[in-house]
Amino acid sequence: MSIETSLAAHLAENVPLAGGRVHPAALPQRPTLPALVYLRVSGVPTYDHDGPTGTVEARFQVSCWATRYGTARQLAAQVRSCLEGYKGLMGDTEIGHCFCVADRDAREAEPGLYHDPLEFTVMYYE
């Protein structure tokens, strides 16, 4: 199982307001909301003087989508509660740490659509 698969399954199981609606990269056409979208922003293997350590420091964006501003904020709070400070097994991926490094509102051009992107650094073992 990849880190992306592990993250998606963890969010689907532990963010009740999303109702299991967790999508990679972008919302599908005509989505059911509220929903989450996850995106790997970057990932860098870590090294020491002997070479690769077997760990990766990755940055993920988890976007919270809803038809109401308050619902988007509630969804963001559930995502933070689910991921912030997480350490241990996530699926079959061992997580060393997970920290929220950004939580903001994003303005959407489409009326009635609210988007709150959160960013997390995740250190995991390959």
Image (cartoon, rainbow, N blue to C red):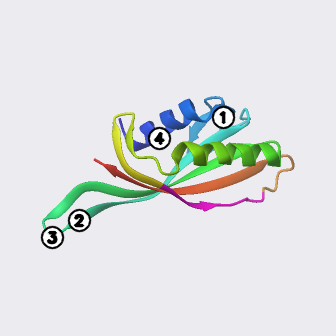
Q: Which residues are magenta?
A: 99-107
Q: Which residue is mark 2?
A: 47
Secondary structure, mark 4, is helix
Q: Which residue is mark 4?
A: 7
Secondary structure, mark 2, is strand
The amino acid on which the numbered mark 1 sits, given as a three-letter code, is Ala
Is 59 positioned to the left or the right of 114 in the image?
A: left
Q: Quadrant of residue 107?
A: bottom right
Mark linked to residue 49: 3
Label 4–label 3 contact, CB within 8 A: no
Instruction: Please give the name of the residue rendered at 70% of the width and 53% of the height, measured from the top-left corner.
Output: 116
The amino acid on which the numbered mark 4 sits, given as a three-letter code, is Leu
Instruction: Please give the name of the residue rendered at 58% of the width and 38% of the height, measured from the top-left corner.
Output: 23
Q: Quadrant of residue 103?
A: bottom right
Circle 1 Cα neighbour tier, 10 Å, few/some/many (<14 / 14–19 / ≥20)? many
Mark linked to residue 54: none
Q: x, y (%) of residue 80?
A: 59, 49
Task: Return the residue nearer the eye: 70 or 106.
Answer: 70
